[in-house]
């Protein structure tokens, strides 16, 4: 597995990481035993980067990872762990106050069973507090040795510019894939300027850029993709007409769609790391194959013709889901 640096002065990590949202049941039922097998596969990597958050479950993902770390204590030195705070699970709300961010961090450290995480994100911006003040709070955690670096999630380029004047931002986590290309409107470039890693979540398009057959009509009412405009008809049918051609192209090259989708994201910059999420060891193994794919200029041009920028019908979030995730153009 090839590695990339998690921000300047950050650790070298496997370029395909592991998003631990799915093992908490975000995209369908997830049983603990299956999740543990997926974590076994992750722990077997050379230098895995695991991305979790207190809100995943809530608490389920962090607890599972913490239990696994306890059983495999020797693996801790090779694993990079990122978690996130700033969202109150009950009642649901966003707060970046110094006291709440500390409460979130201390809770995460306890559940993970560690005294330090390599990367700690502000999960969502609280726009009632200037980002400069939030960065001072996060910088305190760095000084205390509780976190290795500061991360910001779902932000606009201008927020990174302001935040970087206070303290280096090790990573920015935003959705980025062949059907979500907003980061190309300045965020990828801003991250590169500041020596910040762009950590791409949902690189396989919430599961549609894989061999799995996604059927919104069969999703339970609690499945949050069900309300995403891209999964609502007629948008979903239009989108899958494009995506089916991508799947055929991938298979014709001898690649799985998920491996190719991850490889495409990685090809957009050497400061980009992907964190596809899955519940199974098998699917995680498929994602890891992205590191073996070297896309040529011809490959990239052919993919662009199949899935041209802007092809996706519907917004990535509904109005309610958008929340405090920053938009920019």
Image (spheres, rainbow, N blue to C red):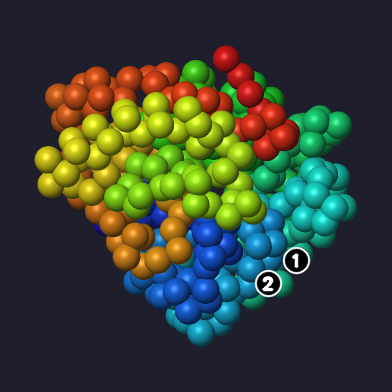
Mark count: 2
Residue 42, image x and y in percent?
A: 39, 67
Q: What percent of the width, then of the height, locates residue 166?
A: 71, 33
Q: Looking at the image, which residue is at 64% across and 47% down?
A: 121
Asked whether residue 6 is in view, the answer is no
Rendered-image quadrant of the C terminus: top right
Q: Image point 79% across, 36% down: which residue?
A: 126
* Residue beneath the point at 81% across and 45% down: 93
CA gap, disc 1 to disc 2? 6 Å
Relative to 322, say whether 118 is above or below: below
Would residue 197 appear left or right of 229 to someone viewing this image?
A: left
Can residue 134 be seen in the rendering of this structure?
yes
Q: Quadrant of the N terminus?
A: bottom left
The residue shown at (57%, 62%) is 25
Residue carrying label 2 = 111
Between 213 and 112, the one lying in front of the other is: 213
Q: Position of residue 146 (x, y in %)?
A: 68, 61
Q: Secondary structure at mark 2?
A: helix
Badge 2, how many Cα within 10 Å: few under 14, some, many 20+? some
Residue 166 placement, left or right of 301: right
Quarter occupied by residue 90: bottom right
Tell which residue pokes out farthest to the top in this image: 329
**Disc 1, disc 2: CB below 8 Å?**
yes
Q: Secondary structure at mark 1?
A: helix
The residue beneath circle 1 is 107
- Indicate whether 258 appears above or below 160: below
């Amino acid at each position: 597995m090839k590695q990339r640096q998690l921000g300047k002065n950050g650790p070298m990590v496997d370029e395909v990481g592991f998003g631990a949202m799915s093992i908490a049941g975000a995209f369908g039922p997830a049983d603990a035993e299956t999740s543990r097998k997926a974590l076994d596969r992750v722990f077997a990597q050379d230098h895995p980067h695991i991305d979790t958050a207190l809100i995943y479950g809530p608490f389920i993902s962090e607890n599972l990872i913490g239990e696994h770390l306890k059983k495999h204590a020797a693996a801790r030195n090779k694993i990079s762990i990122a978690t996130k705070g700033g969202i109150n699970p009950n009642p649901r709300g966003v707060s970046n106050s110094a006291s709440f961010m500390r409460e979130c961090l201390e809770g995460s450290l306890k559940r993970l069973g560690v005294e330090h995480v390599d990367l700690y994100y502000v999960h969502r911006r609280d726009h009632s507090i200037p980002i400069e003040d939030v960065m001072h709070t996060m910088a305190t955690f760095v000084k205390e040795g509780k976190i290795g670096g500061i991360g910001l999630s779902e932000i606009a380029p201008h927020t990174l510019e302001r935040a970087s004047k206070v303290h280096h931002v090790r990573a920015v986590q935003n959705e980025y894939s062949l059907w979500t290309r907003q980061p190309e409107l300045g965020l990828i470039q801003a991250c590169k300027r500041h020596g910040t890693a762009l950590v791409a979540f949902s690189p396989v398009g919430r599961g549609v850029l894989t061999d799995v057959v996604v059927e919104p009509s069969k999703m339970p009412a609690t499945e949050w993709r069900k309300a995403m405009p891209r999964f609502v008809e007629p948008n979903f049918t239009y989108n899958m007409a494009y995506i089916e051609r991508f799947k055929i192209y991938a298979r014709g090259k001898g690649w799985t769609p998920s491996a190719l989708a991850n490889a495409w994201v990685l090809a957009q910059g050497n400061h980009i790391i992907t964190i596809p999420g899955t519940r199974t060891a098998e699917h995680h193994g498929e994602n890891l194959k992205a590191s073996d794919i070297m896309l040529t200029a011809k490959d990239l041009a052919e993919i662009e013709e199949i899935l041209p920028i802007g092809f996706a019908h519907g917004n990535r979030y509904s109005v309610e889901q958008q929340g405090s995730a920053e938009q920019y153009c």
